[in-house]
Amino acid sequence: MKLVRRRRAVEDIDEHAAFIAERNPRAAYRFLDEVEQAFDVLLRHPGIGSPRLDHIVSGLRAWPVSGFESYVILYFIAHGAVQVVRIVHAARDLEELLKGPWEEGPRS
């Protein structure tokens, strides 16, 4: 199993880290570290994420970032990979956010 970070997920990580850094630079580094640790967990146990968003996008799973549980990793398990499509704040309107095409190319 491999991890694929789609372009929008990479942008999300950068945006969230920058937002956190405005208030607390050390917390931003912790956030980045916890995201990578969450990716490691998903690689070892890809089915661990909740399928609670499956009604919005078929096959979509969600897993929180430890220590930053308001941030959720959204991913698919497909083609022998954990494909991370977004990292979002849980307070967002996920149904509205997730509308649109899912054919974006992977970025690893």
Image (spheres, rainbow, N blue to C red):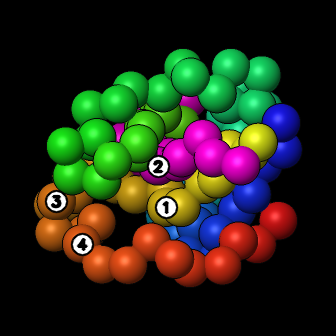
Q: Position of residue 20 (x, y in %)?
A: 51, 62
Q: Residue at x 53, y 70 (%)?
A: 12
- Judged left or right of residue 95, residue 39 is right
Badge number at residue 99: 4
Whole-number angstrom distance, CA of label 2 to CA of label 4: 13 Å
Q: Position of residue 95 (x, y in %)?
A: 16, 59
Of callouts 4 and 1, which one flags the residue occurring earlier in the amino acid sequence?
Answer: 1
Badge number at residue 74: 2
Whole-number angstrom distance, CA of label 2 to CA of label 3: 13 Å
The three-letter code of the residue at mark 4 reads Lys
Q: Position of residue 73 (x, y in %)?
A: 50, 46
Q: Secondary structure at mark 2?
A: strand
Q: Residue at x 40, y 57 (%)?
A: 88
Whole-number angstrom distance, CA of label 2 to CA of label 1: 5 Å
Pointer 2 and pointer 4: residues touching (CB < 8 Å)?
no
Residue 76 lies in the magenta stretch: yes
Pointer 1 residue: 86
Q: Nearer the viewer, residue 49 or 71?
A: 49
- Judged left or right of residue 35, residue 9 is left
Whole-number angstrom distance, CA of label 4 to CA of label 3: 7 Å
The three-letter code of the residue at mark 3 reads Glu
The three-letter code of the residue at mark 2 reads Leu
Pointer 2 and pointer 1: residues touching (CB < 8 Å)?
yes
Q: Secondary structure at mark 4?
A: loop
- Packing grade of label 3 (10 A; few <14, some 14-19, many >=20) is few
Pointer 3 residue: 95
